[in-house]
Amino acid sequence: MPKKDISAELAENDGGVYKVRLFVAADNPNKQVSIGWVVLDTNKNSAYDITRDEEHPDKLNLDAGKYKSFSDKCLKPANKDASQAIAGTRLPFAFDRYFQCATGAAKADECADRFHAYPVSALGSELRSQIDSSMDTVLFLPPVADLKVVLAGRAETDVNIYILYAFKNGKLVAKQTVGKMDGETILTFDISKDYLITTYERNGSIKSKIKNVGHFKMNNDGKFIVCTTANPTCK
């Protein structure tokens, strides 16, 4: 398998010990296939393959110089100040483009500094306990008034799902499913700069004809208002 086809995602960060998922794009454009898991222990400058057995990892032989350079430049700065390491994802947000960037199907210059996806552990224990426990990825979107807005996704199961969460003072006030892929029906979405959310329902694949379009908007209280066909911008 060509190395260029393999993508990596930081799934956990426990005090400088990183759990990394390796995956490739599946034949279905809305799916990913995990091909392995590794642990990068930057405290001991070591790495382990846990794909076969997490309780009995296989130690990897690495170029010590290159590994230390990568750790110092890319991992340790984020570990020293996690708050500065978290970057927000700007709006507008187009799911189709995000998925292309996440799976390596888009050109690098089309994705650079555009989407910032993090393992769900970046959410913090207080907020994490209030979302669906199966979520594995989060993106931090711009706030709405005094609301913290998070887009959470699950891509490790047969049914992928994306939910928009709104928090106020650390408490969940609203949530809305905006995307879902279950092998038969595909629901994708766009989010505009003023939080107008448009969903597109298809049968089969992402290239299939759109059969239903929905519009709703999140207001300053975190409520999701359904827009009518005659008034898709909710004005």
Image (cartoon, rainbow, N blue to C red):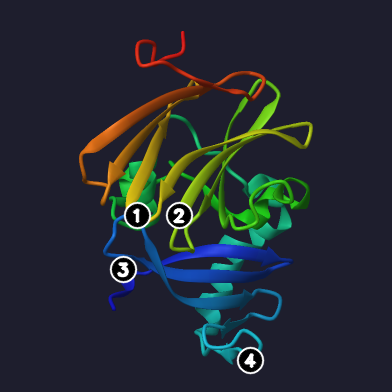
User: Who is closer to the viewer here, 160 or 117?
Assistant: 160
Q: Is the residue marked by circle 3 packed among few (<14), some (14-19), or many (20+) residues within 10 Å?
A: few
Residue 5 numbered tag: 3
User: Label 1's element?
Assistant: loop
Among the two numbered marks 2 and 3 on one chain, the one whose residue lies closer to the N terminus: 3
Q: Nearer the viewer, mark 3 or mark 4?
A: 4
Q: Nearer the viewer, residue 7 or 131?
A: 131
Q: Nearest the camera: 113 or 106?
A: 106
Q: Quadrant of residue 229?
A: top left
Residue at image point 69% right, 59% down:
79
Element at label 4: loop
In this picture, is 211 found above or below 124?
above
Q: Which residue is mark 2?
A: 160
Number of numbered labels in the structure image: 4
Quadrant of image for the N terminus: bottom left
Disc 3 to disc 1, C-alpha distance = 16 Å
- Mark-to-mark CA distance, 3 and 4: 28 Å
Return the disc, 3 or 4, that comes first in the chain's sequence.
Answer: 3
Res. 93 in view: no
Q: Which mark is residue 227?
A: none
User: Residue visible at 50% across and 46% down?
Assistant: 162
**CA gap, disc 4 to disc 1?**
33 Å
Of circles 2 and 3, which is in front?
Answer: 2
- Residues at marks 1 and 2 touching, judged by CB atoms closer than 8 Å: yes
Q: Amino acid at mark 1?
A: Asn
149 lies above or below 70: above
Query: Spatial distance from mark 1 to mark 2, Cα to Cα?
Result: 8 Å
Q: Would you say residue 32 is visible in this rendering?
A: yes
